[in-house]
Image (cartoon, grey):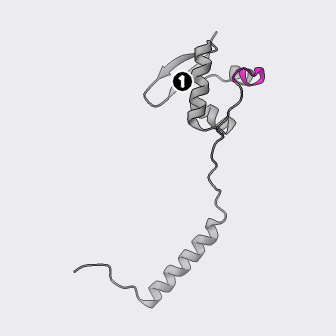
Amino acid sequence: MGGRKKLSLTQMERQQMRQRAASRRGAEVREKRIGSIFGPDVKDEAFLEELRKMKVITPYAIASRYNLRLSVAKQMLRELERRGFLELIAASRYTRIYRVAS
C-alpha cells in the first residue's frame, strides 16, 4: 500500500527549524478583531453628520469605520433607508450602495 515516505533525519531537522521560525514570526502577526455587536445610535446627529460627508455609503465602509460586524452595519443602513435619510442607488445580491437622500 502507498503512503508517505519517511523523512530522513536532516529533513526532519530542517522541518522543525522552519516550524520554529514560523512560530516566532507568528507572534508578530496581528490577531483577528471581531467587530462590535452594537453600533452608533441611528438618531445621533454626529453619526448622521459623518454619513452626510460620504459620497456613497456601503455596509463595508460603515463596518470598517465604526468597527462593527457587517450584519449590524447592514441593519443600520436598512433602518436609515426606512426612515428616509438614505436612498438606495444600486443593489446586488451581495451588497447595497446608498447615498444621503436630498
Q: Residues within 10 Å of mark 1 (few under 14, many from 20)?
A: some
User: Whole-percent x and y of residue 40?
Assistant: 71, 30
Tell me what residue is drawn at x 64 percent, y 14 percent: 85
Q: Quadrant of residue 8?
A: bottom left
**Picture layout, residue 31 above or below residue 42:** below
Tell me what residue is drawn at x 67 percent, y 35 percent: 38
Q: How many marks?
A: 1
Residue 57 appears in the rendering: no
Extreme residue toward the left, this view:
1
User: Whole-percent x and y of residue 44?
Assistant: 75, 22
Extreme residue toward the right, this view:
46
**Picture layout, residue 83 above or below residue 34:** above
| Image quarter hosting the N terminus | bottom left
| Image quarter hosting the C terminus | top right
Decide which of 72, 65 is in the foreground and name it. 72
Extreme residue toward the front, this view:
38
Q: Is residue 97 left or right of residue 83?
A: left
Type of the residue with mark 1: Ile
Residue 8 located within the stretch drawn in magenta: no
Q: Quadrant of residue 67?
A: top right
Extreme residue toward the bottom, this view:
9
Q: Secondary structure at mark 1?
A: strand
Q: Which residue is tagged 1?
A: 97
Q: Quadrant of residue 41?
A: top right
Q: Which residues are magenta?
A: 42-48
Tell me what residue is drawn at x 63 percent, y 46 percent: 34
